[in-house]
Amino acid sequence: MTTEVVPPGPFGSPVPEQEEAATLRADTLNLFDSTAVAVSSVAPSYSLAATISFLFVASAFAGPAVIWISFIPVLFIAIAYFHLNRKDPNCGASYTWLSKLMHPMVGWFNGWVQLAASVLFCVSAPILAGTNTLAFFNSVGWISSSTASNKWLVAVVGIAWLAFITFICVYGIRWTTNFQWIMVIIEYVAVVVVSIWGVIKVAVHHPVGSRGFHWSWFSPSSIHGVTGLAAGAVLGVFFFWGWDTSANLNEESKSANKIPGQAGIISMFVLLAIFLLNIVAAQMLLPSKELASQGSNILFYFGNQVGGKWVGYLMIVAVLSSTVGTTQTTLLPASRISLSMARDRVFPKVFARVSGSRLTPLIGTVILASLSLLGILATTGDASINTAFSNLINDIGVLIAFYYGVTGLACAWAYRKVAFQRVGFFFSGVLLPFLGGLFLLWVGYQVIKQSGSSSSWVVGAFLLGIPLVIVARLTTKGDFFKQKMITYDSID
């Protein structure tokens, strides 16, 4: 039998026919689709429900200041993604870029960190989806409070949502994007309308325990020192995490070298407005004790205080749709990163298999979802849901800060030879990504330093990644780890 000659792979070595066929459905997503996916990936309702109480505990009424301060370095990273994606639209995104610009082992490790963050998130998010589903059933009288709080039932419902999400992910990118449009409309309308209603209620009726708006909430001086800044910023980074999903879908986008980067930047400004509006409304309406103690029920409680039970139900639906949507858009980039790594022969080849009819990484998606399922079961049987969830939020935030930070530094390094060709590009392509990267790495370091042993998940992910990248280096037969590093000698 003769072997068909195929074009060389991304690093010069021939790629077997079956791997060459591992391509996704191209030219599918327009700018609106990519922006919807980026915004839904951040999942404002989910982020607010998961984090407002923790943010208040960490920074009191300085929450708005923490949000806009966190926004700035993450925006700088979004700009870095825009510039890097223009040169190399690969679904591996920062994994691919770092492998070519810094060192293959750095790229591999960065890909591993992203996969670890995604799996951890897909452990915690379905649990919140299960919690909110049962909370809704309890609020309308279908089940008792004791049933709604049963941790194993929460886990079962969360796993059911995870299975549904996985099915849509593997069914096709068009179905996935249409589903995301529905989720985005539900949560954005709910959060914006109820938040504005809350602000008006305080201004007109002055409910007991409410307070007037204060510009000091936006002042950096209201953040209590380095400890308060780091603790708040890691939550702020978690708030904005997910916009880079548009970059991981670049191979499925129209104008693959432009639209994904544009969508990431646009989504950042939309999200900033949503987050600030809701946090300000919550701080105006809710007493301090409730802001600190409600945990993941904060938006349900906020809705009840704004307009009664039916508004609370609406907020539950918003959080539920947001949670489901963001779990889906976390599986999406994870499966694309593992696909890209497998195509480069530095990850198990099973992850490179693409469904022939749907053109989605079916096997990889199912494997990642299965790992998340096991994590849900282990977490449920090992500790209380609230404690596990609280720990995971900080750990995921540190992992995000790491891979965003390193990508920002990589962008500055890649364009160093052309940094001064244009004054504007020096700021957007070099200086701002560099500063954003440094700040985020500092945040991650400070959180690990301050939290110590409570950061076991993130420390475990980092420590496990070191022997894994060494094994990958020693066992890979292709040219991936032998490639020469590149720098960009042009801006366009």
Image: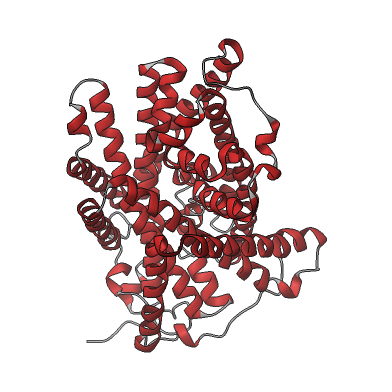
In the image, taking residue 12 as reference, residue 336 lies left or right, namely left
Quadrant placement of the N terminus: bottom left
Q: x, y (%) of residue 44?
A: 48, 39
Q: Is residue 362 left or right of residue 436?
A: left
Q: Is residue 58 left or right of residue 324?
A: right
Count numbered badges in the picture.
0
Which quadrant is the C terminus positioned in?
A: bottom right
Task: Give how far across and how far down residue 107 sits, in percent.
Answer: 49, 74
Q: Taking the image as drawn, is residue 89 in sight?
A: no
Residue 158 placement (x, y as % from top left): 25, 44
Relative to residue 334, is residue 141 depicted above or below? above
**In this rendering, position of residue 83 left or right of residue 232:** right
Compared to residue 25, the image places residue 181 above or below, namely above
Taking depth in this image into account, of 394 and 132 the one nearest to the observer is 394
The reply to whether residue 31 is in sight is yes
x and y, in percent, of residue 290 in the image? 45, 30
Residue drawn at 29 percent across, 46 percent down: 385
Q: Residue furthest top?
A: 205
464 relative to 58, above or below: below
Which residue is drawn at the image coordinates 57% and 43% (left, top)? 59
Nearer to the camera, 369 or 169: 369
Q: How is the image coloured?
A: secondary structure
In depth, the one of 56 and 462 nearer the eye is: 56
Residue at coordinates 40% horizontally, 43% vertically from top-left? Answer: 177
Instruction: Name the one closer to the observer, 135 or 43.
Output: 135
- Give residue 17's quadrant in the image: bottom left
In this rendering, the answer to whether 67 lies above or below 76 is: above
